[in-house]
Image (tube, helix red, strand yellow):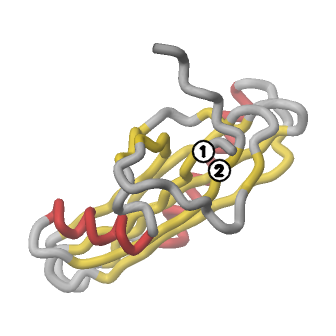
């Protein structure tokens, strides 16, 4: 078996939903994000050098194994706000990085994930050229889930 090809495209997506159980809420949030029929393989946080952002995701066959970095927030507390965020940092002439976080405030969750990206670049002494923060939020009715994801693919 050969190595997987290195991803060269990525896109950000999010979704939120309710369900009768946490797993159903998670599945429904993935469906709302447009990635519910894929077998997501949670990967760590490195974006290959030269990878480009897509505005529109490609069509991927249901059941495909798809690398992704994602955050999920789930709760049973009716009325609670839950948030899931991803932060993508792109370097100039270097690889990029993705960090994920979840919490109960859009502002705080976004601030934390932004700081994580900045720290990751500083630790590696890399110049941060572009930073994208994406936050999904959901007000829980009975069992809720919010998901934010960066999907890595190749074309």
**Quadrant of the drawing holding the N terminus:** top left
Percent across and percent down for residue 117 are 65, 44
Query: What kind of element bears circle 1?
Result: strand
Q: Quadrant of residue 124?
A: top right
Percent across and percent down for residue 5 are 61, 28
Q: Which mark is residue 10?
A: 2
Viewer-closest of 41 and 134: 41
Percent across and percent down for residue 101 are 45, 52
Check the image and name the residue furthest to the left. 20
Check the image and name the residue furthest to the right. 93
In the drawing, does residue 10 fall left or right of residue 30?
Answer: right
Q: Earlier in the sequence, mark 1 or mark 2?
A: 2
Viewer-closest of 130 and 77: 130
In the drawing, does residue 151 fall left or right of residue 49?
Answer: left
Residue for badge 1: 153
The residue positioned 52% from the left and 15% from the top of the image is 2
Q: Quadrant of residue 35?
A: bottom left
Query: What kind of element bears circle 2?
Result: strand
The residue positioned 63% from the left and 57% from the top of the image is 11
- Rendered view: 134 above or below 86: below
Q: Quadrant of residue 47?
A: top right
The residue positioned 70% from the left and 33% from the top of the image is 48
In the drawing, does residue 60 fall left or right of residue 32?
Answer: right
- How many neighbours does mark 2 have within 10 angstroms: few (below 14), some (14-19), or many (20 or more)? many
Disc 1 to disc 2, how far (Cα)?
6 Å
Whether residues under marks 1 and 2 lie with C-beta atoms below 8 angstroms apart, the answer is yes
């Amino acid at each position: 078996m050969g190595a997987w090809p290195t991803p060269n495209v990525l896109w950000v997506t999010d979704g939120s939903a309710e369900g009768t159980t946490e797993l159903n809420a998670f599945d429904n949030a993935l469906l709302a994000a447009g990635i519910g029929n894929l077998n997501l393989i949670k990967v760590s946080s490195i974006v290959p050098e030269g990878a480009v952002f897509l505005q529109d995701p490609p069509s991927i066959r249901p059941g495909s194994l798809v690398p992704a970095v994602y955050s999920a927030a789930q709760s049973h507390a009716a009325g609670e706000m839950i948030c899931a965020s991803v932060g993508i940092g792109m370097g100039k002439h270097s690889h990029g990085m993705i960090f994920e976080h979840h919490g109960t405030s859009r502002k705080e969750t976004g601030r934390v994930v932004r700081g994580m990206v900045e720290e990751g670049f500083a630790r590696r002494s890399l110049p941060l050229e572009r930073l994208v923060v994406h936050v999904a939020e959901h007000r829980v009715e009975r069992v809720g889930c919010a998901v934010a994801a960066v999907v890595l693919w190749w074309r």
